[in-house]
């Protein structure tokens, strides 16, 4: 096993911060040790999971697989500090060992599921969850609140705990798609559990002040796979969890089988009591975490009904703008991008064509809504989504060998949108200035 500490600070600044339509673009090299594509199956471009970039108190952190099949974690002081990286030497991704309940489906390195997810809780602890496809939980965290005072701590692997298969409670198995979320006070971990495509539950675990308050599968269950239709089970493919003005929002589509053509419906729920009770679009209770899970039979769970076989694909991006509008951008029928929007006053949903797919970003101030794409950055209106304006283009080569990861936490802190990508083994972060 190897571990290393690298300092890289290649940074390029283009554009003009004061130019209305051409925000500044900063480009920095995180490392030249990203996971090479020959490790993964041909055609699977990946390496950046949910939270692969995360900003906390003026520092940005990155997490991904490296060329030693180990998790690398990096940090830099914003706005233009040099990246410091190290790989965690005591866990190497292989096709052997305990892969959980998934059997053969959870073995092998690289079918697109086993990304590294990262999150930083409000107390300054860095959390990692990685190497999952129907597998036993892989979780580790910093043993000290290093993100609250990063200059106090030398950046070394010893900051992290050993790999754990639990959150302080029972062992957690059959894990896929981990994702951390926070509003600056609360911190949660989403895990898809107890099955795969077409037959799995959705669970939310709650953390506060150094402890997972909800740490077992039963107490964390929010969406149940069982229902009365189809093959009697489904799974929810979530677009994300968004906190806004004390409310939690989730949107998702159902998938009946491993075949993506069985995706259907745009579903919506919200909670005003920190994730305990969930209501549908009409304000009626349809779920209570750990007690009464949401199902495909829950009344009004589908905000927009879309039949299976429409080529409506799982995946996508969700945000809530400053006025409380919910926006979802995803791949619609026949592979064409589509935008859904919920009016915060009437609760009515609208549907619009989109000229681009990508990651939605809300401007810190004003009406602008941005779309981070592989090619660059687009702008449209949050109130009247439609025609897009190209602000930055020509960046596709930075993502030649990966999907894009985005920093969901930075833009509200300093007005920069950060995305991460990989070309060969070179891992790069691109920063786009959008406000205020």
Image (cartoon, grey):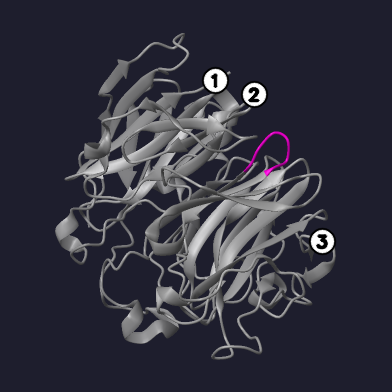
**Above or below 108: residue 400:** above
The numbered mark at residue 366 is 2
In magenta, the rendered stretch is 320-325
Q: How far apart, in angstroms, are the residues tagged by discs 2 and 1?
A: 9 Å
Label 3 vs 2, first from the N-terminus = 3
Q: Residue 255 location in percent, x, y?
A: 51, 75
Neighbours of disc 1 within 10 Å: few (<14), some (14-19), many (20+): some
Q: Is residue 323 magenta?
A: yes
Q: Residue 173 location in percent, x, y?
A: 51, 78
What residue is drawn where x is 78% and y is 77%?
Answer: 292
Q: Nearer the viewer, mark 1 or mark 3?
A: 3
> Total label count?
3
Confirm or deny contact between disc 2 and disc 1 (CB under 8 A). yes
Quadrant of the drawing holding the C terminus: top right
Q: Residue 53 location in percent, x, y?
A: 44, 41
Between 296 and 271, the one nearer to me in the picture? 296
Q: Residue 70 location in percent, x, y?
A: 29, 56
**Above or below 69: residue 132:** below
* Residue beneath disc 1: 435
Between 54 and 394, the one nearer to me in the picture? 394
**Above or below 267: residue 180:** above
Q: How far apart, in angstroms, are the residues tagged by discs 3 and 2?
A: 28 Å
Is label 1 in a helix, a strand or a loop?
Answer: loop
Q: Nearer the viewer, mark 2 or mark 1?
A: 2
The numbered mark at residue 101 is none
What residue is drawn where x is 20% and y is 52%?
Answer: 67
* Residue beneath disc 3: 282
Label 2 vs 1, first from the N-terminus = 2
Quadrant of the drawing holding the N terminus: bottom left
Please say whether residue 329 is visible from this viewpoint: yes
């Amino acid at each position: 096993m190897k571990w290393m500490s690298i300092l890289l600070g290649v940074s390029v600044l283009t554009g003009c911060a004061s130019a209305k339509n051409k925000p500044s673009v900063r480009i920095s090299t995180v490392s030249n040790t990203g996971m090479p594509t020959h490790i993964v199956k041909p055609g699977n471009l990946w390496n950046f999971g949910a939270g692969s970039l995360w900003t906390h108190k003026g520092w940005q952190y990155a997490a991904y697989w490296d060329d030693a099949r180990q998790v690398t974690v990096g940090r830099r002081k914003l706005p233009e500090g040099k990246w410091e990286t190290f790989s965690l030497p005591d866990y190497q991704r292989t096709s052997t060992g305990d892969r959980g309940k998934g059997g053969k489906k959870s073995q092998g390195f690289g079918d697109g599921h086993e990304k590294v997810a990262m999150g930083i809780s409000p107390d300054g602890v860095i959390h990692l969850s990685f190497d999952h496809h129907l597998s036993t939980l892989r979780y580790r965290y910093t043993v000290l609140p290093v993100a609250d005072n990063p200059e106090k701590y030398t950046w070394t692997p010893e900051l992290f705990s050993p790999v754990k298969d639990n959150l302080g409670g029972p062992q957690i198995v059959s894990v896929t798609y981990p994702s951390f979320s926070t509003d600056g006070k609360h911190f949660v971990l989403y895990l898809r559990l107890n099955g795969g495509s077409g037959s799995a539950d959705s669970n939310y675990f709650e953390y506060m002040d150094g402890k997972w308050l909800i740490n077992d599968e039963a107490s964390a269950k929010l969406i149940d796979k069982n229902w009365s239709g189809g093959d009697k089970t489904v799974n929810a493919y979530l677009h994300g969890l968004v906190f806004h003005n004390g409310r939690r929002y989730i949107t998702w589509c159902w998938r009946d089988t491993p075949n993506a053509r069985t995706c259907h419906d745009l579903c919506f729920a919200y909670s005003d009591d920190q994730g305990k009770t969930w209501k549908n679009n009409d304000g009626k209770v349809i779920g209570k975490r750990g007690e009464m899970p949401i199902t495909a039979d829950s009344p009004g769970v589908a905000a927009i009904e879309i039949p299976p076989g429409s080529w409506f694909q799982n995946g996508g991006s969700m945000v809530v703008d400053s006025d409380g509008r919910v926006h979802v951008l995803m791949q619609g029928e026949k592979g064409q991008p589509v935008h859904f929007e919920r009016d915060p006053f009437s609760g009515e949903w609208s549907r619009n064509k989109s000229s681009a797919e990508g990651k939605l970003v809300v401007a810190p101030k004003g009406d602008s809504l941005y779309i981070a794409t592989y090619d660059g950055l687009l702008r449209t209106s949050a109130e009247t989504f439609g025609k897009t304006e190209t602000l930055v283009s020509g960046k596709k080569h930075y993502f030649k060998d990966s999907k894009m990861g985005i920093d969901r936490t930075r833009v509200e802190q300093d007005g920069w949108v950060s995305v991460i990508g990989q070309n060969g083994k070179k891992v790069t972060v691109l920063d786009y200035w959008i406000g205020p």
